[in-house]
Amino acid sequence: MRAKLRSVLLGKAIKSAESESQKYSAFWGLPILSSDAVSSVAYAGEEVLLVLIPVLGAASYKPLLGVAAAIVALLTILVFSYRQTIDCYPQGGGSYSVASDNLGRLPGLVAAASLSIDYVLTVAVSVSAGTAAVTSAVPGLLPFKVYIALLLVAFLTLGNLRGLRESSILFGVPTYLFIVSVIVMILAGLVKVLIFHDVPAQTAAMLPRETGGLSVLLLLKAFASGCTALTGVEAVSNGVPNFKNPAQKNAKKVLLLLALLVLTVFVGICTLIALYQVVPGSSETVVSKLATNVFGTGSVMYYVIQATTTLILVMAANTSFSGLPQLLSILARDSYVARSFADRGLRLNYSNGILLLSVLSAGLVVIFQGDTHHLLPLYAVGVFLSFTLSQTGMVLHWRKVRGERWKHKAVINGIGAVTTAVTCVIIAATKFINGAWIVLICIPVLVLLMLAIRKHYDHVRANLAVTQDAGALVLSHSVKAKILLPIQSVNKSFIKALNYALSLDGDLEIYHVSTDASVTEKLLNQYATLGLKEKIVVEEAPYRNVNELLIHHVDAMEKKLGAHEMLTVVLPQFIIPKWWHNILHNQTSIRLRASLLHRRNVVVVSIPYIINE
C-alpha cells in the first residue's frame, strides 16, 4: 500500500543509468533557475519605496529609478563574474567550491553557511510573497495566509520529489507566463501614460508630504532593500551539473538570459511605479495596484497578473529546491553534513535535502506569520557574503593558474568582489536592527556545526582505517564462539531462535531470569520435553528487573572472553504484521538489542518469527 501511494505521488523509480535524461535543457533550465531573480522584481521595487516614501513623500520616484539603475549595474557585474565561475567550476558548488579551493576551508564553509541560510529564506519569502498576491486579489483569505503559505511549501516539496525533469516542466510554464504577462503590462502601461497621457490622479493625492531630504544613508538603505532583486544569480553556477550537455554552454546561456529578463522586468516595473506614483499598502501589493491602474479593477488581465505573480513567487522558491540539495550533496561528500544528503532518491533527486529545506522554510513561515516585510531584513545578507567570497576566490584563482588574458579576467572578478563586498556591508549595516543580526549569528553557528560534523567523520575514519598489514589482522584459525540464548517461554519463536543458535559453532548457554517460581517450574518442564542436552541457567530476580539482570549477565560473560573471542546473544523476536498491534506487546527484545549494541565484543542477533508465517 505504501509503495503504491509513493508511486502515485512521486512517480516510478528511475534507474541511475537514466540520469542524463532527467537533466534539463537551457529552455527549461531558465525558468527553474531564474525564477528567484525574476520574481524578486515583484517586491524589490516595493521594498525600495517603503524606505523612500516615509522620508521623501512624492519626491521618492526619481531616486527609485536611480536605485534601480545601480542594482542593474551590479547585476551586470555579477553576470560577467559568474560566467567565468561556470567555466572554471563546471562541477557546480558555486561559492563554496570557489572559496574552498582558493581561500581555504573556513571561507568555503562561511560561503556554504551563508548560501544555505539564504536558500531557506528564499522559500519562506517567496511563498509568503505569493500568498500576499493571493490575499491582495481575495482579501477574505487574509486570516488564512499562513496556512496558504504552508500549502504552497507542501506543493513545491511534492513537485521536486518527482524529479528534475518533471519539476522543470511543472514549474517552468508559470515562469514564462509571468514574464509574458508582466511585459504586456509594462508595454500597456507605458503606452497608456506616454501616448494617451492617462494617469490616475488619486494615487498622487494619497502620497504623504516630504518629512526629510535625500541623503546618502537613505539611498544606501533603499539600495540594500532593492538588492533582493539579485538573489538567485548564484543558483545557475550551483546547478551546472543539472544541465544537459554541453552543460557549461547551457548554464552560461541561461545566466545571460536571466540578466536580460531581470533588467527588462525590474526596470519596467520601477518605471511604471514612477509614472503611476503607486504607494505601497499593507493589504495590497504594488504589482496589484499597477495592474489595477493599467488594466482596471476586476479585469481579466488584472487577475492574470495576480495569478502569474503568485505562481512566479512560488516558483522562485523552486530555485532553492534546486540549489540547496545540490549544495548539501557536495558538502556531504566533503563530510561537512550528514552523508545521507549525498544519496539520490528514487527519482534521482537529492530527496533528503528537499525534505530538510521544506521543514526549515515551513518553520520560518510559521515563526514570522507569513509576513514578507518581517522576513526580508534577514534576506540577501548571506547571499552577498557568498558573492564576495566567490569573486575574491576567483581573483586568486586567476593569479594561481594565469593563462590567456588572466589579468583581464581577474579584473572582472575583482570588480565583482569589491562591489558585492560594499553591498554586503551596506545591507548588514542598514538592516542589522531589523533582523540581519539573526543571520550574522546563524552563519558562524552553522560553520561550527559543520566543523563538528567533519571532526566526527574524521574520528570515525581514523578508527576504522587499517594502519598496518591487513593480512595480519585476519585470524589464521577459527575461534569458538560463546552463545547466549535468553528464554522466557517455550514457543515457536524461541524454537526458531534455538535452531539458529544450535547451527553455530560454539558453546551455547540458555538463560532464564525468574520472577515467579511456579512459572519457572512450568517452563523447565516444557523445555525438558525438547530432549536437549543443554541445561537452562536460571537466575532469580526478586525485584523483577529482568532486562537489568540479563545485561549484567552479558557483561560478566564478556569479561571472561579470551583473545579474539566474541559473545553472540541470540534474541527471539516475533513480528506483528499490523504495526498498531505492537502497543499490546512489551517489545522486550527491541529494548534489549538497543542496550546490548554498545558492547565491544558482543554480537546481537535478532531471529524474527512473523506471526501467521
Image: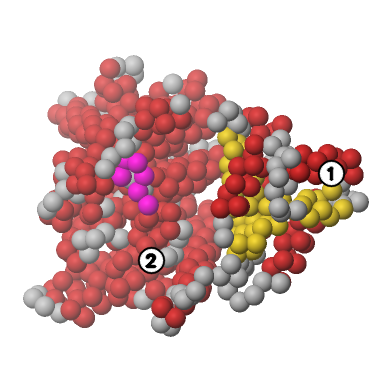
Q: Is residue 44 left or right of residue 16?
A: right
Instruction: Name which quarter of the figure residue 493 lies in.
Output: top right
What residue type is disc 1 on?
Answer: Thr
Question: Is label 2 in contact with label 1 (beta carbons under 8 Å)?
Answer: no
Label 2, on which residue? 334
Lower sequence index among marks 2 and 1: 2
Give the residue displayed 55% in from the left and 31% down from the top.
Answer: 613
Which corner quadrant of the image does residue 162 belong to?
top left
What's the distance in space between the residues labelled 2 and 1, CA to CA?
56 Å
Give the magenta range: 343-348
Please name the residue that numbered disc 1 is placed on: 520
Label 2 element class: loop
Q: How many numbered discs sit on the rendered protein? A: 2
Question: What residue do we see at 15% from left, 79% from top?
Answer: 402
**In the image, 434: left or right of 111?**
right
Q: Nearer the viewer, residue 133 or 290?
A: 133
Residue 529: x and y in percent read: 74, 40
Q: Nearer the viewer, residue 221 or 164?
A: 164
Residue beneath the point at 53% across and 26% down: 144
Give residue 125's mark: none
As drawn, which residue projects farthest toward the bottom? Answer: 468
Is residue 556 shown above or below 262? Answer: below
Q: Position of residue 35 (x, y in %)?
A: 28, 42
